Image (cartoon, helix red, strand yellow):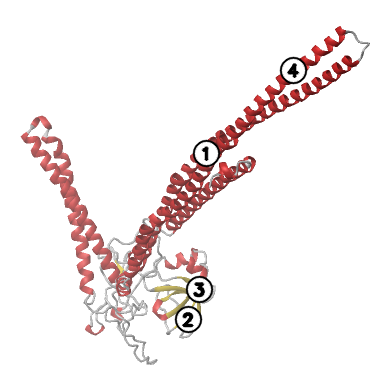
Amino acid sequence: MSWGTELWDQFDNLEKHTQWGIDVLEKYIKFVKERTEIELSYAKQLRNLSKKYQPKKNSKEEEEYRYTSTKAFLATLNEMNDYAGQHEVISENMTSLITGELTRYVQELKQERKSHFHDGRKAQQHIETCWKQLEASKRRFERDCKEADRAQQYFEKMDADINVTKADVEKARQQAQLRHQMAEDSKAEYCSTLQKFNSEQHDHYYTHIPNIFQKIQEMEERRIVRIGESMKTFAEVDRQVIPIIGKCLDEITKAAESIDHKNDSQMVIEAFKSGFEPPGDVDFEDFTQPMKRTVSESSLSNSRGDGKSEPKFGGKSKGKLWPFIKKNKGAGPEDFSNLPPEQRRKKLQQKVDELNKDIQKEMDQRDALTKMKDVYIKNPQMGDPASVDHRLAELGQNIEKLRLEVQKFEGWLAEVEGRLPMRTEQARRQSGLYEAQNTSAVNSCAQDRESPDGSYTEEQSQETEMKVPATDFDDEFDDEEPLPTIGTCKALYTFEGQNEGTISVAEGEMLYVIEEDKGDGWTRIRRNEDEEGYVPTSYVEVYLDKNAKDS
């Protein structure tokens, strides 16, 4: 099966077919190139998607990623980033192993094809030239034969005519002989040219053209093999990254299996537990006497039955209206007394840990400088020992200051832990009914007495009357722009808000929510344009608008 013998007369068709083969190869190169662009685009979109959902550093969102479910999601995002990297590898390998190699091969193929068909056209031109020479020799032989016949006829005519002289007859005879000789010479030349042409034609169709066509056939077969190998490479590039992609998917599965719902539930308790006990039973209200309400077991106020009078506040002492003091208005108290007990304990413990770390850093620096000073003392040429004394003194002062700070925060921490119930008990649901604390200029730990709903309790005795100066709370609310409504709520229980900033609600009443619970157990609601305030979160069922949730 050879193109040289089977397709000896199909030069033009072979030229068209080989050009079509190159077009197919270039089309395949374009296809692979577009595939690499798709892989790069897909990888870029995956990376952007992973980046979009990554938690922002030093934000509240980053704190939320301590739960096992959100950690699993973060692991998924990281694996998706690696997954995108494998698609970039596919693009790079296809570009280098297929697109680049085939592009160079196409240029070489075009040059080889051009050379082969140039040789073919040259062979055709040569055989055509031989044919023209043969035709010219043949016409010349034919013309000379006709001239010889006419000269012979003229001689015979002159020889038969008695009126013609002998000289004329001789002349005609010589002319006829000359023409016959010329015809013989033309015949010999024609025979020689014919033999030469037949030899050239035989070589052309049985040697030159078959050789050229055989080279063209081999070139075309190499092209076919090359495109087949490229298709195998195309599949192999994909196959090589499958194990790595499989590992990415395995890691996502492993992260999903690491989710621990019990652990997440415990973390919610640790994050939001206030440390207060639920409110006690409500006493029967005898309208013939002032209303009394029992005090929560966790109340920090003095016992009502001990007959001791409550401390009175005077001067610049101001009763704290926690949790109604507005947030984001300057820094909170240093002792975190504006937080519920459990949250306050966590903040104080965190502060103590931070201070201890700072002390350790300072001590490490002091130790390093002390060693350096010892080296200077032993080897004075290396430095002056007195040069580090100033820095050592500074470090000593810093350590002493930090230790005093630790003692201060540890004192507050011990105070809070002494008030909290046993931490081994099962965490109870936060009721949102906190006791108010009052800070005076002399004693920052003086406590006021407050009933579970946030209202102050009055003693029947005139001697125990509480005097709480007016705060700037009302002014802060009056100067504010009205907050937008973010949802509605339904009162589950009746709440009589008697403290500053609270609002009374009846069981089953529907109201508007204007501020969510910020972790202190209180929700800010509105009845109408003139009535708004805080109620315990546990006393209402909140329905937030969808837009509020998204924001």
Residue that numbered label 2 is attached to: 490
Question: Badges 2 and 3: C-beta atoms under 8 Å apart?
Answer: no
Q: Secondary structure at mark 4?
A: helix
**Comparing labels 3 and 4, the label whose residue is closer to the camera:** 4
Residue that numbered label 4 is attached to: 182
In the figure, 10 relative to 446: above or below? Answer: above
Q: Amino acid at mark 1?
A: Lys
Q: Secondary structure at mark 1?
A: helix
Looking at the image, is mark 3 or mark 4 earlier in the sequence?
4
Residue in view at x 29 percent, y 64 percent: 336
Looking at the image, is mark 1 or mark 2 earlier in the sequence?
1
Image location (x, y in percent) of residue 471: 39, 67
Q: CA distance from mark 3 to mark 4?
A: 124 Å
Q: Amino acid at mark 3?
A: Gly
Q: Amino acid at mark 2?
A: Lys
| Occupied quadrant, residue 429 | bottom left
Residue nearest the observer in this picture, 309 or 149: 149
Residue in view at x 37 percent, y 73 percent: 521
* Residue 215 badge: 1
Residue furthest to the right in view is 163
Image location (x, y in percent) of residue 251: 34, 63
Q: Amino acid at mark 4?
A: Met
Residue that numbered label 3 is attached to: 487
Residue nearest the observer in this picture, 468 or 243: 243
| Occupied quadrant, residue 8 | top right
Looking at the image, is mark 2 or mark 4 earlier in the sequence?
4
Looking at the image, is mark 1 or mark 4 earlier in the sequence?
4
**Comparing labels 1 and 2, the label whose residue is closer to the camera:** 1
| Occupied quadrant, residue 128 | top right
Q: Secondary structure at mark 3?
A: strand
In the figure, 80 relative to 32: above or below? Answer: below
